[in-house]
Image: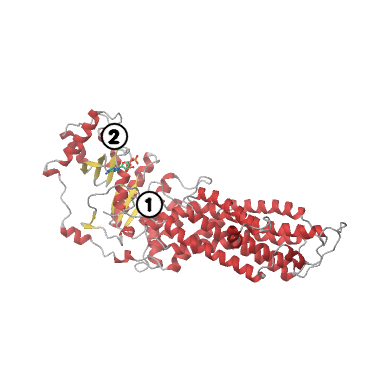
Amino acid sequence: MAILGASGAGKTTLLNVLSARLDSLGTLSGKVLFMGRPRDKTTWKRTVAFVEQDDIMLGYLTVEEQLLYSAKIRLPSKLYDNKTKLQRVEDTISMLRLEKCRDTRIGDAQTRGVSGGERKRTAIGVELVTNSQLLLLDEPTSGLDAFAAHSVIENVRNAARERDLACVMTIHQPSWALLNLFDVVQLLAQGKVYYDGTPEDTIAWFASIGYEVPKGANPVDYFITIAENPGKTEEGEKRIQDLIASWATRPQAQRASNASEDAVAKNHQDDSVNREWPAPWLAELRVLTVRNYLSVVRDLLPLYASIGQNIVLLIIIGFAFFRLGRSQSAVLARIGVLYYLAINTAFTVLFPVLTPLALQRALMKRERSSGAYRMSSFIVAKILVDVPSNVLRILPFFVILYWMIGLRANAAAYFLFIAINSMQVVMAVCMGLLIGCLSPTIEVGQIIAPLINVIFLLFGGNLLPAPPPWFIWLRYTSPITYVYAALSQNEYRGQTFDCDVKDAAQQCYTTGEQVLEQYNLQDFSIAANVGFVAALAVVCALLAYVALRVVARPRFRFI
Ligand SMILES: Nc1ncnc2c1ncn2[C@@H]1O[C@H](COP(=O)(O)OP(=O)(O)OP(=O)(O)O)[C@@H](O)[C@H]1O
């Protein structure tokens, strides 16, 4: 079925009402029946598949992978084993004529991928591969040339027939030939119907109420134009109201008979399986983790940027603090570089976590509107990929810097130094997740993230002489406090320094313990400090989960 109408006629709104995904306010009235029955709120999101106008896809995945992952998580495992899921992907690829581009990546603004028509057919395939009974498509042909548009509609029609799928789509200015591919066409103006029947009958109906298609004109354009009133004239408004009224009061002969009870009963499928999550938690986790992992290994630009960043930092920090000795100036330089390391990790990890979250979060919301997977598997999959990838990305920096600066030449201290910094990476990943999940948009997150870091660095070191009492909690919630203290204890404990100052009034540190005492870095042991960072990371991850449930929860409205 095609829904046609001028811009603003209410086509998208109608699809949103049918899918129950309407997120605007306003009153809804009327009835929505599916196969003669009211929609079941518990199964509807998995009964309906919706290809929205702005399809959200991961550009680094191939066409086949998009379909495969959709099948793996959205096809109910109770009805489809792995082999039948793969078969369904194969069938969908051939139905949508995607064989030629199955191994091509979708692409994005930076990298060219499949053509516009192939991208749209893939977006349709992602929905078609599922176990839904109704397929809704919002302007699947927009932005496509006539040939691509024709092939999309033809493929969808054949697939819908083969899968016995009810299919409703809005479509913008189709050619007459294209319109005739549909079984039913519905014309809308001001949210109301002014024609609903077969495409062939349109010409006769409009002629019968005085709108003969002018010679040479595209009938579709003509039928839409007569229901437009761009100048907001009284005459135009009257014409639209007449068109709506003529259809509402049409003779009985023109009324389509409602589906008979028999047909309803025959078509009614047992959809109790749609009440449950389609796949087990671990299967969801596996697919989402692999999908995230591929984003890291296929899009290498952030990795190259990070290698460049590490090289620049190594040159600057490594040579600025090169081979610190045992002099009094080296004692203070050590304190500076250890504090700097804690801050540097917090900043360099936050943004690589936040940036991809924008697309991932939008896609997750869309996929969860179809009841695809649990929120918990999304968060865990994100942590499972972001933590090791960020640790590995920064590890060479710590490994080399340690020796360049000439920190304590002791294997245990060296590995502990790497472990403490790695724990700080874990913390920064979880904090990035929390900020990304809490912010209404990722752009807002990118403003909040440095602000939070600046507050933490201010209260997490020795910058403030004594934090005001009502801000003391910031000192204990700042991960920098614990990382800085742990790194310092690891470096200073048991060390001795030369007292090489000439001025007798100047303080001289001869042992590392004196430094730790002076800078108040011994409140907790190294193990306790690392434990606090780990606990903060867990709290951030849990809060991220709660925040995501609130911010990115798909909303449904039923009438
Ligand atoms: N049945 C209705 N009753 C009242 N308001 C409606 C109705 N349908 C749509 N609207 C309102 O009309 C506006 C346009 O609707 P919508 O975006 O659905 O139009 P459209 O036909 O999809 O337009 P376009 O082709 O430009 O995407 C929206 O503000 C929507 O809230």
Q: Amino acid at mark 1?
A: Ile
Left or right: residue 498 compared with residue 209: right
Residue denoted by label 1: 124
Which secondary structure, mark 2? helix
Q: Residues within 10 Å of mark 1 (few under 14, many from 20)?
A: many
Instruction: Confirm whether residue 102 shows in the render.
Output: no
> What residue type is disc 2 on?
Asp
Residue 144 vertical position relative to residue 441 in the rendered view, above or below = above
Specify the quadrant of the image occupied by residue 418: bottom right
Asked where in the image residue 503 lies, by quadrant, the reply is: bottom right
Q: State how far apart marks 2 and 1 are (Cα).
A: 26 Å
Q: Position of residue 383 (x, y in %)?
A: 53, 62
Question: Pointer 2: residues within 10 angstroms few (<14), some, or many (20+)?
Answer: some
- Identify the residue under disc 2: 221
As helix, strand or loop, the secondary structure at mark 1 comes to: helix
Mark 2 and mark 1 lie on one chain; the one further toward the N terminus is 1
Q: Residue at x 32, y 51 (%)?
A: 136
Where residue 261 sits in the image (x, y, percent)? 16, 58
Residue 454 seen by the camera = yes
Horizontally, is 457 left or right of 88 in the view?
Answer: right
Decide which of 152, 410 is in the foreground and name it: 410
* Residue most extreme to the right: 502
Q: Position of residue 114 (x, y in %)?
A: 47, 47
